[in-house]
Amino acid sequence: MKAVGLFVALIAVAGCETKQIAELNYSERKALADQLVQRCIEQGVPVTSPQFQLCTSAEAQAENAKRQRNLIQAQRAQASLSRGFQNASNSYNQAAAGSAAMNRTITCQSVPAPAGMATVRCY
């Protein structure tokens, strides 16, 4: 059940942007730049003002930080999922080994001894 939750978390994080800005090709960078410009315009910063350059720079830094956070979260989720599956595998293997030990054939041999006693050996 824990592995299912981790899997859902991994899918949720995988939908977020994790590709670093330095890894974007030209057209992807252009699209991102257009989005950053649009964010500043929506915040009411005039395109011709000196604050516009500061706004786009701040938005680029925020975008970069968000992508780094998303990448770290995705890596952590993937590692947790991997550990969850490994733990499940270990539990299964332990149960299978225990089951095999409990289901093995036990043979006992009784050797008569004097005075009505017997020695029993099981193997």
Image (cartoon, rainbow, N blue to C red):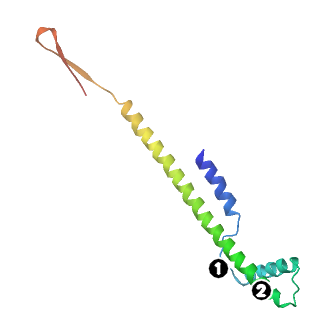
Residue 45 location (% of width, % of height): 86, 83
At x 87% / y 87%, what residue is drawn? 47
- Asked where in the image residue 101 lies, by quadrant, the reply is top left
In this rendering, the answer to whether 101 lies above or below 118 is below
At x 88% / y 85%, what residue is drawn? 46
What's the amino acid at mark 2?
A: Leu
Mark 1, residue position: 23
Residue 103 location (% of width, % of height): 38, 30
Which quadrant, please, contains the C terminus? top left
Query: Which residue is the extreme one toward the left?
Result: 114
Q: Nearer the viewer, residue 43 or 39?
A: 43
Left or right, residue 71 beside residue 51: left
Mark 2, residue position: 54
What crowding class fits label 1: few (fewer than 14 Cα within 10 Å), some (14-19), or many (20 or more)? few
Q: Earlier in the sequence, mark 1 or mark 2?
A: 1
Left or right, residue 61 beside residue 82: right
At x 43% / y 39%, what residue is drawn? 96
Count of labels in the image: 2
Left or right, residue 109 beside residue 22: left
What's the amino acid at mark 1?
A: Glu
Residue 33 location (% of width, % of height): 77, 82
Q: Nearer the viewer, residue 59 or 8?
A: 59
